Image (tube, helix red, strand yellow):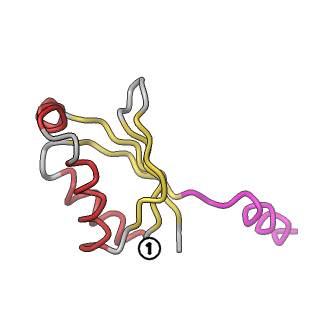
Amino acid sequence: MPIYVMLTTLTDEGMKTLKHKPERIKEVDKEVMERFGVKVLAQYVVMGPYDFVNILEAPDNDTIVKMAVELGSRGTIRTLTMPAIDVDQFIKDLKELG
């Protein structure tokens, strides 16, 4: 299945939610798996312009977009999602170009 990198920034409302209920992070991870079939492979808290880096596995682009819209519509996060291509696959694809 395709891999995606999702960078997440908490809104003010998201910060309040996280402060009062930090376990909400794991609840959302479970929800995206059950509702969208998106698996959280890795998740990191980071410092800088983003608050979280998430490595996700999803069936396709449509699924990941629907999930991102659903999560963003709640008003607690903003996301930037990018497809991730395996380096070996990328090299193979480039070699096929000739």
Is 29 placed left or right of 2 in the picture? left
Q: Residue at x 34, y 71 (%)?
A: 63
User: Relative to residue 17, is residue 97 depicted above or below?
Assistant: below
User: Relative to residue 51, is residue 76 depicted above or below?
Assistant: below
Residue ranking furthest to the right: 98
Q: Residue 42: horizontal and vertical position, in percent?
A: 48, 52
Q: Residue at x 16, y 42 (%)?
A: 76
Q: Give yes or no for residue 21 being in the magenta stretch.
A: no
Q: Residue at x 24, y 35 (%)?
A: 10
Residue ranking furthest to the top: 48
Q: Which residue is mark 1?
A: 60
Amino acid at pointer 1: Asp
Q: Give yes or no for residue 88 being in the magenta stretch.
A: yes
Rendered image quadrant of residue 14: top left
User: Relative to residue 55, is residue 31 depicted above or below?
Assistant: below
Q: Residue at x 16, y 31 (%)?
A: 19
Q: Residue 89: horizontal and vertical position, in percent?
A: 73, 66
Q: Residue 43: horizontal and vertical position, in percent?
A: 43, 47
> How many numbered discs sit on the rendered protein?
1
User: Which element carries disc 1, helix, strand or loop?
Assistant: loop
Give the residues in magenta.
Answer: 84-98
Rendered image quadrant of residue 56: bottom left
| Quarter the C terminus occupies | bottom right
